[in-house]
Image: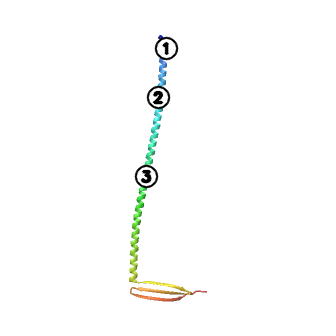
């Protein structure tokens, strides 16, 4: 290195101002960098919160759909069981009605017969049964047909 120069007071003051200015610029640059980093971190945290909220909403929607499906399935099973019970009761009622009607016909009697139309008259054959008694009726009824 060369010979050392003597620094005057003005040069020293100029160097002090330059150092202060460089320090100010560096601090300002660091402050801006820190502020930008803070802004990016806040934005990233907001994105994470939104993403987490979206995941929570999807999980809740999935849970609600599952619960709805379970409730629907349970209602179908209950409906099926009630319908099955109703069909069994209906079948039992029909059997009871059948035996009751058969019993009533046997004890009270019934009417059985058929009819035939021939030309302008009605041939009617009836059998009326009351317990052990039976009565047969045959009759030809002329029909007033205008030609």
- Vertical side of 90 occupied by 45: above or below: above
Q: Residue at x 49, y 19 (%)?
A: 18
Q: Residue at x 39, y 83 (%)?
A: 108
- Vertical side of 113 occupied by 18: above or below: above
State which quarter of the image contains the C terminus.
bottom right
Q: Are marks 1 and 2 in contact (CB under 8 Å)?
A: no
Give the distance between the C-alpha atoms of the residues marked 3 and 1, in whole angstroms. 78 Å
Residue 103 disc label: none
Q: Residue at x 48, y 32 (%)?
A: 36
- Residue corresponding to mark 3: 64
- Vertical side of 130 occupied by 22: above or below: above
Of residues 135 and 145, the one drawn nearer to the viewer in this rendering: 135
Question: Which secondary structure lies at badge 2?
Answer: helix
Give the distance between the C-alpha atoms of the residues marked 3 and 2, in whole angstroms. 49 Å
Which is more N-terminal, label 2 or label 3?
2
Which is more N-terminal, label 1 or label 3?
1
- Residue corresponding to mark 2: 31
Image coords of residue 128 (percent x, y): 44, 86
Which is more N-terminal, label 2 or label 1?
1
Question: Which secondary structure lies at badge 1?
Answer: helix
Q: Which residue in the rendered view is the most extreme toward the front?
A: 1
- Residue corresponding to mark 1: 11
Image coords of residue 4 (percent x, y): 47, 11
Image coords of residue 58 (percent x, y): 45, 48
Q: Are marks 3 and 2 in contact (CB under 8 Å)?
A: no
Image coords of residue 70 (percent x, y): 41, 56
Question: Which secondary structure lies at badge 3?
Answer: helix
Circle 3 crowding by C-alpha within 10 Å: few under 14, some 14–19, many from 20: few
Q: Residue at x 39, y 82 (%)?
A: 106
């Amino acid at each position: 290195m060369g010979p050392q120069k003597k620094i005057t007071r003005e040069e020293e003051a100029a160097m002090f101002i330059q150092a202060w200015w460089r320090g100010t610029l560096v601090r300002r640059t660091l402050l801006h960098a820190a502020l930008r980093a803070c802004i990016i971190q806040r934005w990233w945290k907001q994105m994470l919160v939104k993403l987490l909220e979206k995941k929570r909403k999807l999980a809740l929607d999935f849970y609600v759909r599952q619960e709805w499906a379970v409730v629907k399935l349970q209602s179908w099973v209950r409906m099926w069981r009630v319908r099955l019970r109703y069909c069994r009761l209906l079948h039992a009622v029909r059997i009871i009605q059948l035996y009751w009607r058969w019993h009533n016909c046997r004890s009270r009697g019934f009417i059985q017969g058929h009819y035939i139309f021939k030309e302008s008259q009605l041939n009617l054959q009836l059998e009326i049964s009351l317990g052990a008694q039976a009565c047969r009726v045959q009759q030809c009824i002329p029909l007033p047909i205008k030609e």
